[in-house]
Image (cartoon, rainbow, N blue to C red):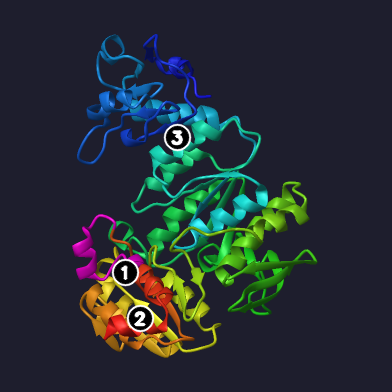
Amino acid sequence: MLNPHDLLPFEAAVHPAARPAVRLTWDSRQADAETAFVALPGEHDHGNRFIESALERGAPFVLTDLPGAAGQLPRTVEVSDSLAALTAWAQQERARNRLVVGITGSVGKTTAKAYVAAALNAHYMPVYNTIPAIACFLIEFGSSDRPLVVEMGIDRVGEMDRLVNLVHPDVGVVTSIGAAHLEGLSSLEIIAREKGKILSAPQALVGNQARVWYPERAIYGFSTPELPVTYSGQDLRVTEQGADFTYAGQAVHLPHASQVQAEAAVLGLHLAESNGVPLAEAIQRTEQVQVPSGRYQIHSGRYTVIDDAYNASPLAVQAALSALKNFRGRRISVLGTMLELGETAPELHAEVGRSACDSADLCFGVGPYAEVLGKRAYRTVPELLSALKAEVQDGDVILVKASRGISMTPEQRAQEGVGLDSVVDELLAWRDRGPAQAAASLA
């Protein structure tokens, strides 16, 4: 339980009705009888506006820096700076845990997090990876006897310093370095420098797609004669059924996985083995990993849809296109806009488009860069969907990938060729209607 009196060392005034909580949230809409609310400053508003709403929802306590709150509002815990108190509390709780793994990278963070957490039987961060989210996670699970796995994403200079100071990872991992968040980080050299700050951890590991930037660090993945790695799986074989390899002489099968997932599994198994986790148990959990929606999920049927639409950067698209080559049948790439690439956006979209047309039998593009992303180019998502429905056949394999554009309205996403999860949903619904119904509705 999370006791509001634990905040007293941070000069907190605790209302007498405040009671312990099971978890914390920075979103007042998620407050309930077991979930306390932390009122934090935001870009456009302050959580103090929603204190009463959280209390009405039954929040056991509300952490706030609203002056006089503890004397006027029930169950409030008043501090001078709510974000500073939250992060200090998180550092205190994190210090109780014996093993914390921090993972960053231009792509592959969430996938690596899933496989490492499975292998270690660890608690792990949900999708959000902001400082408030990480702080709430550390407070909730810091005292657990299970390891913690924390995803540490950045999009601006200096952010990794704050994250490392908060998390103090025992193991720091960089999965990859590539063109992503260039509007805030401006160059690959700066991306590598900033993300590389996680490697100040006592143990540091980098993936094959980051090795050129950190040649002195231990590498995980799969060795080749030209590129040996420090901690390696063996005999990797990737097909449309998934990835098979051996680790320390034991067979591993990852259903519907690509090489990216296999490399993440090697990372997890190495960390499990080096921390005394029985390898057979770690492999069993690893083979059962389910990646979140939109991250290389394979939906088989009359035709196969590869849902990799959660987000996109040039490196991530290239990896997805490489995986597409392992499938039999007519291969179709459906690519949309990659965001936050700055002035290099036209050049990077064109490069990805050339790779798409080399990897796929048919390549579709949508949005402002549609003409360089595919030979079949469409300005908006509805136009793209109409063309896809007219083209798709039984036995096809369709890869869908683009950035999310979560700050945009649905209309803006459709216009800008982002957020292609709607394309995945429609293709699956269209497929499940069956050939006759689909043909009839198209007519």
Q: Position of residue 341 (x, y in %)?
A: 30, 66
For label 3, the SS is helix
Quadrant of the frame with the C terminus: bottom left
Q: Earlier in the sequence, mark 1 or mark 2?
A: 1
Which numbered circle lies on residue 44?
none
Q: Is residue 358 visible?
A: yes
Is residue 373 in view? no
- Which residue is found at the position 46% from the left and 73% from the top? 306
Amino acid carrying mark 2 in the image: Ala
179 to 142, vertically: above or below:
below
- Amino acid type at mark 1: Met
Q: Are marks 1 and 2 in contact (CB under 8 Å)?
A: no
Label 2 residue SS = helix
| Residue 5 at x, y percent in the picture | 46, 15
Relative to residue 279, is residue 239 depicted above or below?
Answer: below
Give the Cα separation between the discs numbered 1 and 2: 31 Å
Q: Nearer the viewer, residue 43 or 215?
A: 43
Image mark for residue 438: 2
Q: What stretch of residues is rendered in magenta? A: 406-422
Image location of residue 78, percent across then percent down: 33, 17
Query: In what element is the residue under mark 1?
Result: loop
- Residue under label 1, please give it: 338
CA–CA distance between discs 3 and 2?
A: 47 Å
Up-down relation of residue 158 to residue 440 (above or below): above
The disc label shown at residue 136, or none: 3
